């Protein structure tokens, strides 16, 4: 009798655990969301929700890039600095060189891709462990971007080195990146959703994505299946660079000046959302929608806490707690063998 | 030295339900070299690990000089006088420290030498150790960072380190695998000296010529049981059949011998090891070529060279009368050369990937329409492999790692059959594979050859050879020593060739 009872309890426990691994994360998101919704008048206003989404979009997009590098078994720590580089480059192009918004946008993307390519060369061909290579790049970029602007934030009407006043300003078109609306939805949120969709499609529906996961799961076996592992790994870092640059572009448009400290805090947030994303639905692998949901959860928590009047430093605590809880779902509770474990 | 003998009585060890050692009785007398032979998976490394204190939960007893001892940890094993020199030297030395420091490392680690002990203060004792082994190591050498040593000196260093504490038993696991011929001689001289000083030595090696030269006594292990013991001079043929197994299954190659006429792959100037002679190899379509050799005879090296994953490359290769120079597996696959690698889990499987996903990976373009993978078609391909090779699975969506070893291998072999193989290379395809799967894979290989392709099977077991191959090549130390059809030779002759001691 007690044996049967024990067995029932055991199977119940296992099922509970599986449920938690699969839906625990989404449940936590919904519970928090409902709590904020019920307890805070301000939280219920659509404008609050959209501004929350808008503010989350940058982290989410940069995190999406990180997701690609995680898929191939690596990690990109230079994303925050690349986003910051994007801010400075776009401001420089428009304010100092008086170029068009479109041209600065393209320069930002190119800059991101170039940094990604350098990361790729360091990691894939020069065989430097990814964490170390991208850490090095992070410092290099953080310093290097200050070189042409003498370590100053770039704003319109600033005095240049030769004593003249900067000729240009942020163009209206460029400022619209952050301010425009598609219907009732802010443009950055639309960009976020579109990029998430594209990434999801690439990673799960195409040959490219399948191979990316193969490279991450077992590079040796992938090679013996005829895959040129190096090129796929390299592509992840280039994509990561471009996504970080897009994030930087939105950020630049939001701030409206070349703030030199912009993007610095993005790194940890972006890596965190991508890591949190691995635990969504118990997938245990980096994935596009997971990253989006991870960003959303962190966005909800931070907005909620802010509205509830918690001090700013509570945000970091909250992010950390979310990350640890999410990782508990995928590491401690999950019984899957395959899961993302950062290399080196 | 202590002149103690070490005895193992009824040693057993199992992992989960897998019994690796089933009652091994082995005694290693002092002042003698006892060689332990056994094929892969025979249980040698488990036995070594028990002796070095890594598996305290084994069955049976270990006695040192008649007294039972408990080997509960590596430190304990050492204090009981059992020293093991493991195969990977580079893992045993501590780079960044000098030779002298490495030599006396255990004493330093145990705190016997003061923390402040300078390198200079270590030198006299280090000199003593070296002198005891008649190694003429200068002070300059003793001060060197081990990082600068070549592999042979590192090997000698680990050996010297093991005898610092005057062990009763010295276990040497494949001590020569990284050494050149001259270096082997130096090592052998040191081993003889130790033996003469009264140390009991358990020598584990695949190289029969070395065992022949150094061992006084020979023990053969297979499937966790001692199958035979001999004193010098050794009857190698007996030892080898004890090691590889007399066929209990008998006539397995019921199918008629196929002989190919057309040369499909010609390799010239293939030099497998730095000290082996280059040779030419010709693989014909329409037959199954079996390459047999002991571990380390160069089988995997040939497979790798053909598939484009090797650092060694032959002078030239032609496939189908066209130059063939695979610099990457992608190129080999494009030309229809497929490899089923030796280490299944490490080299062909992706954790939690389904059968379908594993099958389609090399042929994704076949199931890709426009930009997207056609999942229905992919599933079909998986189902086809299941059907084709009789994989026991719930369906194409079941993950490969949840299958049994045999069924995993069927999936891997089956996936290449979905392509258009010109040459299918199978490296040890039957390892960890049940008899049913083995039959299925052999049959598919023979069918493939019958349809005019070439199949190349690398194996270390004669039974497998007779089951699958038409033509046999015996590889000894990186050089083919026999190349004929199976109908023209027999088990005896193949074994003899394999055991030829150069």
Image (spheres, rainbow, N blue to C red):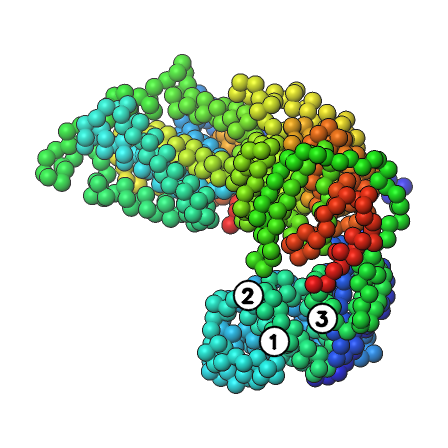
Residue toward you, A229 or A136 = A229
Q: Position of residue A137 (x, y in %)?
A: 37, 45
Where is residue B212? Give x, y as percent: 74, 68
Decide: few, some or many residues near mark 1? Use Cα within 10 Å; few <14, some 14-19, many ≥20.
Answer: many
* Distance of label 1 from label 2 (alpha carbons): 14 Å
Q: Quadrant of the N terminus of chain B?
A: bottom right
The answer to which of marks 3 and 2 sits earlier in the sequence is 2
Q: Are marks 3 and 2 on the same chain?
A: yes
Q: Earlier in the sequence, mark 1 or mark 2?
A: 2
Q: Is residue B323 left or right of residue B33?
A: left
The quadrant of the picture occupied by the C terminus of chain B is: bottom right
Query: Between residues B205 and A302, which one lies in front from this camera angle?
Result: B205
Label 2: chain?
B
Taking the spot 71% from the left edge, 65% from the top edge, the residue there is B209
Label 3 crowd bin: few (<14), some (14–19), many (20+), radius 10 Å: few
Report the chain holding disc 3: B
Spatial distance from mark 3 to mark 1, Cα to Cα? 21 Å
Residue placed under numbered mark 1 in the picture? B160
Residue placed under numbered mark 2 in the picture: B151
Q: Is the residue A126 above or below the residue B97 in the image?
A: above
Which residue is tagged 3?
B213
Q: Secondary structure at mark 3?
A: helix
Decide: few, some or many residues near mark 2? Use Cα within 10 Å; few <14, some 14-19, many ≥20.
some
């Amino acid at each position: 009798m007690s044996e049967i009872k024990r067995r029932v309890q055991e199977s119940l426990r296992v099922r509970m655990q599986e449920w938690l691994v699969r839906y625990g994360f989404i449940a936590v998101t919904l519970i928090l969301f409902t709590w904020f919704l019920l307890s805070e008048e301000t939280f219920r206003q659509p404008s609050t929700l959209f501004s929350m989404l808008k503010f989350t979009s940058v982290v989410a997009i940069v995190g999406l890039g990180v997701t690609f590098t995680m898929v191939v078994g690596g990690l990109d720590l230079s994303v925050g600095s690349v986003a910051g580089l994007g801010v400075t480059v776009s401001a420089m192009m428009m304010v100092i060189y008086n170029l068009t918004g479109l041209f600065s946008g393209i320069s930002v993307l190119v800059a991101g891709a170039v940094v990604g390519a350098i990361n790729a060369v360091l990691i894939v061909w020069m065989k430097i462990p990814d964490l170390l290579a991208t850490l090095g790049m992070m410092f290099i970029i953080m310093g290097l971007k200050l070189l042409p602007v003498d370590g100053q934030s770039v704003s319109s009407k600033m005095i240049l080195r030769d004593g003249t006043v900067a000729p240009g300003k942020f163009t209206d078109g460029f400022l619209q990146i952050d301010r425009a609306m598609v219907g009732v939805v802010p443009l950055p949120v639309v960009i976020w959703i579109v990029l998430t969709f594209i990434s999801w499609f690439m990673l799960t529906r195409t040959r490219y994505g399948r191979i990316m996961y193969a490279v991450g799961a077992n590079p040796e076996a992938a090679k013996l299946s005829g895959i040129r592992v190096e090129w796929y790994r390299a592509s992840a870092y280039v994509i990561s660079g471009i996504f970080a640059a897009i994030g930087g572009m939105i950020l630049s448009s939001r701030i409206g000046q070349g703030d030199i400290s912009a993007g610095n805090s993005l790194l940890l947030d972006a890596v965190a959302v991508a890591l949190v994303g691995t635990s969504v639905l118990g997938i245990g692998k980096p994935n596009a929608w997971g990253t989006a949901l991870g960003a959303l959860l962190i966005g909800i928590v931070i907005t909620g806490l802010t509205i509830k009047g918690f001090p700013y430093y509570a945000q970091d605590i909250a992010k950390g707690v979310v990350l640890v809880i999410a990782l508990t779902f995928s590491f401690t509770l999950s019984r899957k063998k395959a899961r993302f474990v950062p290399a080196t | 030295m202590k002149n103690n003998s070490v005895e193992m009585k009824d040693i057993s060890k199992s992992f989960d339900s897998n019994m690796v050692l089933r009652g091994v009785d082995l005694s290693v007398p002092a002042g003698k070299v006892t060689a332990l032979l056994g094929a892969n998976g025979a249980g040698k490394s488990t036995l070594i690990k028990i002796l070095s204190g890594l598996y305290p939960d084994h069955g049976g007893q270990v006695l040192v000089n008649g007294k039972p001892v408990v080997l509960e940890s590596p430190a304990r094993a050492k204090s009981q006088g059992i020293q093991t020199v493991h195969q990977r030297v580079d893992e045993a030395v501590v780079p960044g420290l000098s030779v002298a420091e490495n030599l006396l490392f255990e004493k330093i680690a145990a705190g016997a030498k003061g923390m402040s002990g300078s390198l200079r203060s270590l030198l006299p004792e280090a000199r003593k150790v070296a002198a005891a082994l008649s190694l003429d190591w200068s002070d300059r050498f003793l001060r060197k960072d081990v990082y600068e040593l070549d592999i042979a000196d590192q090997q000698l260093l680990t050996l010297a380190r093991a005898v610092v504490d005057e062990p009763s038993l010295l276990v040497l696991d494949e001590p020569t695998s990284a050494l050149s011929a001259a270096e082997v001689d130096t090592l052998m001289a040191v081993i003889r000296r130790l033996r003469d000083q009264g140390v009991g030595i358990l020598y584990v090696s695949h190289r029969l010529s070395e065992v022949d030269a150094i061992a006084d006594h020979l023990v053969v292990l297979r499937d966790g049981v001692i199958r035979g013991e001999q004193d010098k001079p050794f009857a190698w043929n007996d030892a080898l059949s004890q090691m590889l197994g007399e066929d209990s299954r008998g006539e397995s190659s019921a199918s008629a011998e196929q002989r190919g006429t057309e040369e499909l792959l010609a390799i010239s100037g293939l030099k497998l090891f730095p000290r082996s002679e280059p040779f030419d190899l010709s693989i014909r379509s329409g037959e199954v070529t079996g390459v047999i050799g002991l571990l380390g005879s160069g089988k995997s090296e040939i497979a790798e060279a053909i598939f484009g994953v090797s650092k060694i490359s032959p002078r030239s290769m032609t496939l189908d009368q066209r130059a063939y120079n695979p610099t990457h597996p992608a190129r080999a696959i494009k030309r229809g050369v497929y490899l089923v690698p030796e280490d299944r889990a490490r080299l062909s499987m992706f954790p939690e990937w389904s059968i379908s996903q594993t099958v389609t990976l090399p042929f994704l373009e076949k199931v890709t329409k426009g930009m997207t993978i056609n999942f229905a078609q992919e599933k079909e391909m998986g189902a086809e492999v299941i059907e084709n090779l009789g994989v026991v699975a719930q369906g194409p969506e079941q993950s490969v790692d949840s299958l049994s070893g045999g069924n995993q291998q069927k999936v891997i072999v089956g996936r290449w059959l979905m392509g258009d193989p010109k040459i299918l290379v199978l490296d040890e395809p039957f390892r960890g594979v049940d008899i049913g799967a083995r039959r299925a894979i052999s049959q598919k290989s023979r069918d493939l050859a019958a349809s005019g392709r070439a199949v190349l099977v690398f194996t270390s077991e004669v039974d497998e050879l007779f089951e699958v191959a038409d033509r046999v090549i015996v590889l000894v130390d990186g050089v083919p020593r026999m190349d004929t059809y199976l109908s023209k030779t027999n088990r005896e002759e193949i074994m003899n060739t394999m055991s030829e001691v150069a």
